[in-house]
Amino acid sequence: MSRGETEHTDFSATPMTEASHSRQKIARAFLGIATALLLLPLFAIIGLLVTHGMSAITAEFLLEAPTAGMTAGGIYPAIIGTLWLIGVSLAVAAPIGIMAGIYLNEYAPENWVTRMINLAIVNLAGVPSIVHALFGVGAFVLFLGLGTSILSASLTLAVMTLPVIIASTKEALASVPVAFRHASWTLGASRWQTIWHIVLPNSVSGILTGVILQVSRAAGETAPIMFTGAAFYLPFLPQSVQDQCMALSMHLFTVSTQVPNVPEAFPYATALVLLTLVVTFNFFSIGLRTYLRARRKW
Amino acid sequence: MTDTTSGTDEGQVSTSRRIAAIVEPAIEWLIRLCGFSAIFFVFGIFFFVFSSGADFIMNRLDVVEFMTSPEWYPTSVSNKRYGTLALVAGTLSVTTLAMMIAVPFGLGTAVFISEFCDGPFKEALKIIVEFLAAIPSVVWGFIGLAIMNPVIIDVFNAPIGLNVLNGGVILGLMSVPIIVSIGEDALKAVPDTYREASLALGATKWQTVYKVLFPAARSGLLAAVLLGVGRAIGETIAVLMATGHAVQIPNSPLDSVRTLTATIAAELGETAQGGDHYQALFAIGVLLFIFTFAVNLTADLLVRGIKNK
Amino acid sequence: MSDLAKKKIEVSGLSVSYGGVTALDSISLDVYEHEILSIIGPANAGKTTFLNCINRMIDSIPDARVQGTVKIDGDDVRQVRDVNALRRRIGMVFPLPVGLPMSIYDNVAYAPRMAGKTDKTRLDELVERCLRQSALFDEVKDRMGDLGTKLSGGQQQRLTIARALSMEPEILCLDEFSIAVDPVTTMRIEEVLKELRKEVTIVLVTNLVQQAKRLADRTALFLDGKLIELDSNEIIFSRRTADQRTFQYVQGLFG
């Protein structure tokens, strides 16, 4: 029975049920309003960013380095820096996270060790981003001697995004029916062959969805990269992962809190570019998910 | 059965199987290693954060002062003090206000989406909530700074709009998506037979929600709230930008505060590496780690409780 | 079966428990080469567990404890080094048909490919032969690229049988294959099995007493994990059963 069709079924409306039905209507209206109130800010934010920031978005703004103490010029190095950070952190987090997801869904026995791993994932996901930053400083910048660099910042972001990649990979793999695995094993295929030929081809889009969502999260993070590799002001482009870089999120933080005399539209425009980047990734992932549901093979 | 494969085919077979016999165990070994990575990183985080502040924590930190004094004067020349009470109060005040907003709105939206919506409308709402979750914290912080700040000054006639109220509202909005999605999962986990039984007895949908679904999904909803709390405690950049920079125990929502997370973000760049102040910030990191660890552990136990039921 | 027939599977003292609950209780029986042995019995009699012990799928059930031995051609299956090679010798058909999420052709070619046989012309021959053997070829020959999962239940079950045959197994185990299949298809598959017994040894777990009677050379009755009686069909489906319960079960007095 679908949950939407139950109201037609009452035949005799006593005063008692009439009262409770009007209460139900009030409750429903209230919940609807709560939901609407919640979604309002989302549209308000987008609206405000567009109206205040759109005027500043020009080819120059997108394709040139900041000048005059960041009060003029553009945000090109920040865009490129963000792409570097996303790319490198993804290159590290995606393989580890996907393989960890495969381990947990396909290999891990049901015992206390696995329970510990799952607990660790939940807690890793809950570690505050600034604590990740401290870890990045302690482990990558200082202990491994990578210095403040794209590499340090990306590794910090990678550790941060890892738990969600693991969780979404697990979920995607679990959506492939167990019966397929059993059928494959009885045909003499090894565990790995079964994963490679049956499980992964039918969950790859789900895995990608999770990875893309994490990309968008990494793109927006500020705290973990502040002390590990993102520079306040660096008007040239990074040449390797050992360089520092600017980043959109960091740039927005800087121009809105640290730098005087920035034109009013600049931070709005920067926020708009960052939001557009993030939303694009999100749209992409939602589109992929919808597409994949439509062409499931069973 | 007769074997139809010829000699050359057999040769091919054994070569490819021989390669597989080497490659497959190697891949599986790598997968196993990655599987354990989460444990490795959690311990790694605790180890590196703790050890970076260990010298100070073990030798010079007055734990009583650290936990109970509101005086955070790490840069004072004459009398350095490392009390985090005001910072804890900052975190708690902002988190409390955030939860006062996020819990009713989040759970209300979860109920609305899960029980009162159907089809494409439901999907659309879920997607919008996902977008809300996708807004980066620095953008939220900027909204607090550039939009909420003047509004609060105008409406409340406050001297400054960067305060508990500003941070609480921003943080509340940021915590809503996680409460909605975990809360919705918890409601979804209640078997449909419960709803049908209740509706069959003549209860309205709303009665079903608060008499049947809330009790049945109690621990999951609590977990949703706890994860929201965890998120709010850990949030850094948005509160750094929206709550002002006053290290004080707030008396009203219009007072500026400084949270634990914001303190680290604001001061780490200005300290000498390895100095007491620097190490004290790592000590705050340890405190935050333990805080959020406890919250997430509890939430996880609650969620697991539902699954095992 | 004459005493001269070769023993293909020898089971002795086989007991299985899942987390302390006994599923099989010291089963001992032999299956002869090229016979159809059917196993009947009510639900939870341990029939499926028994099949899982033959191809060691029991290994993938975490809390299963196995005692006793299963030998194929005299070799203990639990001593086998390469379990995948063992499974290639044993075709297995489940109660509910499971088409793999790939084309019909790929479904049948899957097992040989996983075993490293990739020669295109040989695979073409093999796929066609297996599909003919399972009486499916004529229905699908023009759409070999369609998804196996989109076939009807009866067709998927025949696809599963074709797939089981693709490794040219020595033993074919079927677990209540007719549950999700219409009567006409069931009869067709039964014809297929009669043909196949010339080449393979068949263990047929069935919930249909009449099916056992039609197809098998010998029939075993399992009850609560115990082997109650195993004898030729002449005995089992007569009044001369050694155990009263066999007669009662066959007559449909319980089950």
Image: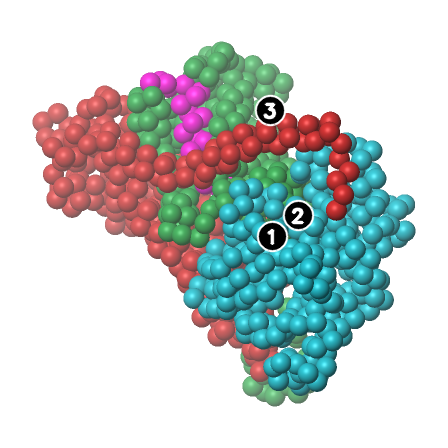
Chain colours: A green, B red, C cyan
Labels 2 and 3 within one chain: no
Query: Which residue is disc 1 drawn over?
Result: C72
Query: Which residue is disc 3 drawn over?
Result: A57
**Residue A136 coordinates in the image, percent (x, y):** 35, 28
> Which quarter of the figure has residue B66?
top left
Query: Does C135 sit left or right of C98 as displayed?
Result: right
Dominant secondary structure of the residues highlighted in magenta in the image:
helix
- Nearer the observer: mark 2 or 3; the answer is 2
Q: Chain of mark 2?
A: C
Q: Which residue is pictured at 46% across the width and 38% down the height?
A: B32
Residue B10 visible in the picture: yes
Query: Does C84 sit left or right of B154 as displayed?
Result: right
- Nearer the observer: mark 3 or 1; the answer is 1
Disc 2 and disc 3 in contact, CB within 8 angstroms: no
Disc 2 and disc 1 in contact, CB within 8 angstroms: yes
Labels 2 and 1 within one chain: yes
**Residue C219 coordinates in the image, percent (x, y):** 68, 70
Q: Which residue is pictured at 70% across the width and 48% down the height?
A: C169
- Closer to the chain start, of discs 2 and 1, is 1
Instruction: Tell me which segment is drawn in magenta.
Output: A145-165
Disc 3 residue type (three-letter): Ile
Q: Chain of mark 1?
A: C
